[in-house]
Amino acid sequence: MKRQSLIFKAPLAVEIREEDCPDPQNGEVLVRTIASAISAGTEVLAYTGQIPSWMSLDETLPTLKGTFTFPFKYGYACVGEIIAIGAGVEETWLGRKVFAFNPHESAFITPLESLIPLPEGLSEEDLLFLPNMETVINFIQDGRPILGEQVVVFGLGMVGLLTTALLTRFPLHRIVALDRYPLRRKAALELGITAAFDPLSEDVLRGLRSILESLGYHSGADLVFEISGAPGALNQAVEITAYTGRIVVGSWYGRKPVALDLGGRFHRNRIHIISSQVSTIAPELSGRWTKARRLEMAVEALKWLRPSFWITHRFPLEHAAEAYQLLSEYPEEALQVILTYA
């Protein structure tokens, strides 16, 4: 059979290419894609050519082999239906809806063991948020929020919104968020957080401090999540972090340089900067936490939130170029963008 695959052809250029799709072999299944989600962070960096070409697409996902050297396939959030099975796979799998960490394409072959069945109580579109939710759980495990802390989130893209949503389930004293775009700040405020600021507004640090220092006996944020993708946010994070506070850096800046000012509050406040990336689990947790356990937790978190209400745009696969142009040129208009398949 034939399939249509999205190809990152060159910076700012994607195309839909027709390919042969092989038959499933022993232990494999053929999945017809229903929808796939676009990451407004990583994928826009890939689309605009801001990721080093030598870097591996993903060292942990067999579906993402190769590097960011154009042309390449990318994407890692597909939901589809099993329409054919290989030897050794029970027929009961035919017709089942599943999630796969797979690039954007209308059909694909994959080992059955790599798929996650659609859980009861979740829609196909809710399940598209699974990779981002797994990332969020990794961030929060690395940050380790503590009862009564003040937490600040820089960046309210989809990962930032999911992080903020999950933090609202903790008994924290305050949650404050920052993002350039009113649509994102509005979405965060609807979660019930204390305040949301534009990081580029005049006196934004003064506004942050006025909230974080209003307790009188405490100065600054205990925990900060920097997931904006904006290198300048790190210096703002250092400025508002309290003595011995933690900054979890989840942003991937790609080729963008980061000029970090370590000559001011950083040393005297003994601030901890923590690198967090979902491809691995922190060594102090990996004795008890596996990727399978973390994915299971991510599914449960999706059931709490059911985040498909944050999908603002749906583009047919053949109009994928418009989707990437929207996210690249008009990011203020979108929250989550997905591709749909006939």
Image (cartoon, rainbow, N blue to C red):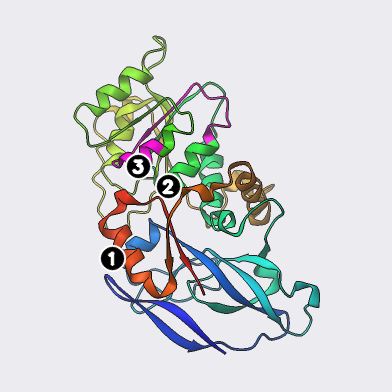
Three-letter amino acid code at the position of disc 2: Gly
Marks 2 and 3, how far apart in space?
22 Å
Q: Give me the residue at 23% from left, 45% from top.
A: 259
Nearest the viewer among 27 and 62 is 27
Residue 57 to residue 294: above or below: below
Label 1: which secondary element: loop
Marks 1 and 2, how far apart in space?
20 Å
Three-letter amino acid code at the position of disc 3: Leu
In the picture, measured across the screen, residue 124 lies left or right of residue 94, that is left
Q: Any magenta on residue 185?
A: yes
Residue 224 visible from this viewpoint: no
Q: Tell us which disc is closer to us: 1 or 2.
A: 1
| Number of numbered markers | 3
Q: Give me the residue at 65% from left, 66% from top.
A: 98
Q: Residue 109: x and y, percent? A: 61, 80
Give the mark, 2 or 3, whose residue is nearer the N terminus.
Answer: 3
Q: Residue 9: x and y, percent? A: 32, 78
Q: Residue 132: x and y, percent? A: 51, 52
Residue bearing mark 1: 48
The magenta segment is: 167-186
Q: Any magenta on residue 31?
A: no
Nearest the viewer among 192 and 262 is 192
